[in-house]
Structure formats: structure tokens, C-alpha cells
Amino acid sequence: MSIESKLEKLSLGDEPSVVEEVKKNGVEKSGLASNIHVLAGKAESKDDDEAIASLTLIKALAEGAPDAQAVTKICLSACLEQAAAKNKAVTTAATDAALAICQNINPFAIKSLLPVIFSKLPVEKKWQTRELALKCIESFGERAPKQLGNALPEVVPEVTACMWDTKKQIKTASTNAMQEALKVIGNKDIEHMTDKILTAITKPKEVPEIMHVMAGVTFVQSVESPALAMVVPLLLRGLREKNTATKRQSAVIINNMSKLVDDPIDAAPFLPLLLPALETNATSIADPEARGVTEKAVEQLNRLKGLADKAVSTRGDISKLETEFKKAFSAEDASGGLELCIQHAASVSTCMMDLHFMEDMQWKKNILPTFTSYFDAVKTEEKIEKVRVEAEGMLVIPDEEDEEDDAEELCNCQFTLAYGTKILLHNTKMRLLRGKKYGLLGGNDSGKTTLMRSIANNQVEGFPDSDEVRTVFVEADIQGEQSHLSCIEYVFVDPKIQALGCTREQVREMLATVGFVPDGKAKPDHAVSTLSGGWRMKLALARAMLQKADILLMDEPTNHLDVINVAWVKKYLNSLTNVT
């Protein structure tokens, strides 16, 4: 019996056979795609038995046929509406079905459910429907924390509005949802303040005191959109307070946090809110010092805005990926179930782009099941990879015009770096100009030394060959078996120096340029074991310069050096105007 026939006379107990049919034949062949709106209509039926049977089937499909989620999620609206039914059995079935959809959907697809959920939150809706919608948002916290964090700029304003509701159940549900949201902001600098942020939403009188506490926070972690989504409403309130001190503290916090925004696109949604309020204060605050602090914050946000305007943002823009999927599958005129699947895939892939999940296996795992009803698996995998490559291109930030256009370009490449099974850098661009100085910043085990050794060993894809650009990795450590050698011999016996055909006299001359002279503190004919850390670094630099290096790679060159030697290394490196 077809699904269409079963839906005509649907009753409790039919769920296993329908789910099995969908799992066996897919959403198209089974008839689920063409009849999903019929099922949604029956779920909203005034006939309690029909509604319960339909809602139970929706729950079973959400839990038992995950590959059908692109179609099944259409029923979420009906489930939320039935939460206000008079029959308790119907409301229970509706709650179970709605939560089953939210808890079993691909985590990267939760944004596709938000428009429906948000449409059920206005005060005109029945409170039971609003309460269930808020519980759906709360359920994302445990199931999809990163994805919920990505959605916070949209979620926070909607939930905040509900926290002022007069209905006790709505207040409780919205507070619970906001508490889950606060758990996923992912910023250790403000995690300890989540309770205070929650308090500030419902108790505006507490804002000045909370702003005072936040002004004492030292921000060191990169600031991303989840943290901004939580803090910006509080900062806006601070900027609008009558008290000048609170306005000043808000400006200080904004200035400090904005400097730690790595991706300007993270800040883009909040700039239209913060800039006008700051600009108003910059012209209206009477206190000159507070006004100056506010002006600095305005200047900093305008700088961030300039960077955000330059970046081509695909964040949350499902339409671009939808177009790419239609093009890849030659489905520009797609309708019905296939159109639903393409929209679902676009939603999943857009979220993956936002969160930088761009590996081919990640895309295959999260998107391939969506199209199993329509295309061959091998063909589908090829098409998904085609879209993924296009998506990677969308994430590339256009190069800024360099002022030093006249400087010689030594390197301009894009590469991926891995250590074992760990991806350290993915599709990373690197451009180096002659005579410029560059720094690598990163935590322990983030791949700084690995990158430099890979460059020195000519293992970085796209990096110029050593015949074109001579790259030297500067190491100051003295190997034990060489510690008895004199400074001149230590440099002279180096295989690379030997390969260049350098003479001992050339070695002596180069050592003299960094201070190795017979009557100096470090003598060229004395053993290297007698050298301090500072002189070992000078020895390493001299050896590197003998190799006529175009690029010097230095791993923590000031380690174990005193102030005088640090100053010397700094001055020496800056004097190398032709070496990068």
C-alpha cells in the first residue's frame, strides 16, 4: 500500500510500515515528498485521533528515517500549533514530534528550523505554542552547541523579547533557552559573567553595576559572533544610560573587545547597532575625557566596519549555495521533494561554511544522504565536491592592495599543512616581500615550527624552489658532537657552507661582521662550547648569512637572551634590508 493510501486512513500503529517504506525507497519513490503537506495538514486536524496518529508518525519519521529530514521538517509548524490543542493527548504527541524533529535533524541544519520557530513566538500566538517553540530552541544547546552559537545573532533578540512576557510559563521557557544559549558563547573571558548578563536582560537597574564589573575584565581571547550576540545588547543599554561613567565604561569595553575580533564579518551585524549609539555619545557627553574615550571607540568600530565592508560575506546566505547545488545537479527547475532537498543541503552547507567545516569528507557525510532518493551515490559525491570547491572560493578574502608594490615578491602561494593526522593550516595564503619582516603568532603545538621547517625543507606546496629563493632555518642549538669545534670550524664544516664552496677566510670575515674578532668577547678561534646564548644566536645568524639567504626563518630567536642581546638581534635583523 502506498503512503498516499495509508495517509487517507492513517491510524496509530501504521508508523513502522511507513518508516520502513521511506527507508527502503527514499522520500521520492515512497511518495513521502509529494504527500508531506498532506501529513502536515492531518497533524493540524481538529479530529483528535487523526491528529495523534499523524503526529506520532511525524515523530517516528524524525527518529527512524533521518535521511528524510529535508522533507519531514516541513511538519514542525503543525506540531508547534498543536501544542495549544485542548486534548492533552494531542499536545503530548505534538510536543514529542516537535522535539523529535529538532533533536534528530542534522546539527548544521538547525538554522533552517529557526524561521518556523520564530514565527510562533509573537504574543498573538497561544502561549502553549510559544512555550514549545522556546523549548525547541533550548534543545539545540546540547545537540548542536557550535551551530546554536553560530545562530545566536538571530536567536538572542527573539528569546530576549520573550523574557519580558507576563505569562509565567513563557518567562521560564525563555530563561531556560537563554541559559542554554549562554553556555555556547565559547569565550572564557566572559563565561563567568553569564549569570550577570542574564540578570541585565530583565533588570535594567542592574546594568550600571554589571558594566562596572565587565569593565574590569581583561579580554585576551578572540571575540566571535556568539560572544558579541550576548554582550552587545548589554553594551547598548550601557551606552543609553544617563550616567556618564556607565557610558564611558561601555565605550571602553567596546573598544577593547573590537580589537580582538579576528573576522570582521563576525562584527558586521552589530555595527549598525553600536556605531549610532557611540556617535551620539561622542557628540553629547559633556565630560571631555569620557568623550575622548568614546571617540576612540567610534574610530575603532569604523576601522572594523571598513574591513567588514571589504570582505565578501556568504554568512547565512543560503541562496548562493542553493544556486550552486541546482547548477551542479542540472536542476534549475527543481520542484517538490528535490527542491526541498536542495534547500536543505544549501542550509547545511552554508552553516558548515560559517563554522569552517570545509573538508571533503565532512561535506560528504553531512550532505550525501539528502540526495540518495534522486541521484546515484557516486554522481552525488562528485556534484557535492564541485559545490564544496565553489564554496571554498566564496570564503577567500580578496587581497588588499599593498602599499609596497615596488618590493620584490618572493612568495605568493596557497597551501595546506598537516602534522600526522592533524590539519594545522588549510588552504592558507602566504605572500612574502623582500626586505619585510613577518611574525608567526600561535599557541603551543599550533604548528609554527612545523611550518618553518617545512618551508626550509622545500615541503610547502607552491613555495618557490630553493634555486629561486634561498631559505635558511636559523638554529642556535649546538650539537654535542660539535661543541669542541672552534667557531670558524663549526660554521665551515656545515654541509650547506661546504656545498657553497666558502673558504675559511670568508667564514672569518662574516663572523667579524657580528662581533667575532680576536680581541673581542667572543673569539673566532675559541670553542663554541664557551659561547653564551646571545653569541650562539650571532653565530647562527652569521652562518645563515654566509648562505646568502633571501629568507631567514627564526624560531623564538630571543629565547634565553638578555636585554642587551635582544636589542642587538633586533637591530641586526632590521639592518638586513634585502633579507626577509
Image: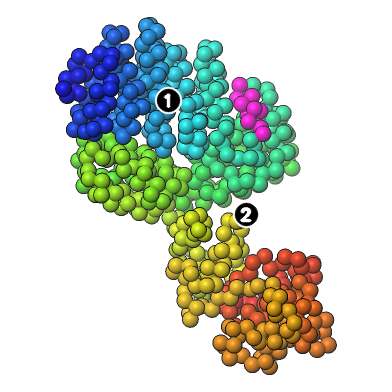
Label 1 CA crowd tier, 10 Å (few <14, some 14–19, many 20+)? some
Answer above or below: position of 416 versus 481. above
Residue 162 x, y percent position in the rendering: 51, 20
> Please, what is the three-letter code of the amino acid marked with disc 2?
Gly
Name which residue lies at 69% across and 35% down.
214
Camera sees residue 413:
yes
Question: Within 10 Å of the Cα at label 2, are there few (<14), some (14-19), or many (20+) other Cα atoms?
Answer: few
| Magenta-drawn segment | 192-202
Question: Would you name the residue on which mark 2 appears?
Answer: 443
Residue located 46% across and 44% down the image:
355
Q: Which residue is mark 1?
A: 118
306 left or right of 348?
right
Please tell me in which quadrant of the rendered image residue 286 appears: top right
In the picture, which quadrant includes the N terminus? top left
Mark 1 or 2: in front is 2
Q: Give how far across and how far down residue 345 sits, in percent.
A: 33, 40
Give the x, y percent position of residue 127.
Answer: 45, 13
The circle on residue 200 is none
Question: First in sequence: mark 1 or mark 2?
Answer: 1
> What residue sits 39% from the left and 43% below the top?
350
Q: Is residue 475 left or right of residue 230?
A: right
Q: Residue 546: percent from the left, percent from the top?
A: 63, 84
Residue at the top extreme?
Answer: 86
Is the residue 481 above or below the residue 428 in the image? below
Q: Hey, which residue is sitting farthest front in the picture? A: 481
Overall secondary structure of the magenta stretch?
helix
Q: Residue at x 30, y 8 (%)?
A: 48
